[in-house]
Image: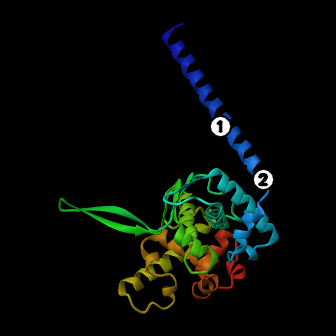
Amino acid sequence: MSYYSAMLLFFSGLGLALLSAYFFFKLRKEEKLQKLQAQPFKEEHRVYLKYTPHYENLSKEDKAKIERSIITFSGTKEFIGVSLEVTEEIKIIIAFYACLLLLHKTESNCYESVKTIIVYPNAVALDNIQAANGIYKKEQFLIDGQATTDTVVIIWHDAKKEAYHLRHNNVVIHEFAHEIDFMDGVADGIPPLERSKYDAWTEVFYSDYKKLNAVVLKNRDWGKYKLLGSYAASNEAEFFAVVTERFYESPQSLKKHFPELYSELKDFFEMDTAKLIKG
């Protein structure tokens, strides 16, 4: 056998092995999803949901669908507790608010790219190293949550309070809004959109984002922009995450003061939250 024939045979075999492995793991994944979907939703888990301000107002069909999503989400993500035990309540509440965002956007398997949920009991201090003129300075700053393409960090102290009461803010919604933003490859405040809807979205969002920035710089005459707050002016990605929080937590106020913004979010999430939540 010639050298080239041997190399061709080797790479053909390697390709076949990789293809076989791909289909094997895909089949295993599908079998796992089928087993998860066959599981009934536990009544003790439903009790946690009944205390949230969102679950009880969902239709019967939406309740059934999000329960399916919760089972799949909690069964396919690795939950890691840092200085706390990850309880069933933690899993169910995080899964509920994460999947609520995609309730009308996907089937039961939401956030396939997210692999790990790290849960801390309280705010986390991270180091930030800055360099200027050859001088390095290390500072610490607190985070309430964080999102990357495959990992989400949640602070349970905040998440638990926000899960059961409308507070404008909701750290789970905020961080998973970032995950939705990541879905088109870049966190820029523009989630995956149909091409026909791109121009309307960017015109409305960037208009209000720029106006908010101007208000923050002057730090006066906040008016309706007080609803969004200064953190939303950090960048376009944070603006999207904050307005998504308001869309689910303060829909009446958002609809009143920012009707065009509300309309774009309603169209994207395929949900009229002002009818779901009276707050």
Instruction: List x then y, in percent, for residue 17.
Output: 61, 26
Q: Residue furthest top?
A: 1
Placement of 63 over or under 279, stated as above or below: above
Name which residue type carries label 1: Phe
What residue do we see at 52% from left, 60% from top?
84
Q: Is residue 271 left or right of residue 143?
A: right
Which residue is the site of mark 2?
Answer: 39
Mark 1 / mark 2, whichever is N-terminal? 1
Residue 25, disc: 1
Mark 1 → mark 2, Cα distance in angstroms = 21 Å
Q: Is residue 104 left or right of residue 205?
A: right
User: Is residue 278 in view?
Assistant: yes
- Between 159 and 132, the one lying in front of the other is 159
Placement of 57 over or under 145, stated as above or below: below
User: Is residue 107 in view?
Assistant: no
Q: Quadrant of the C terminus?
A: bottom right
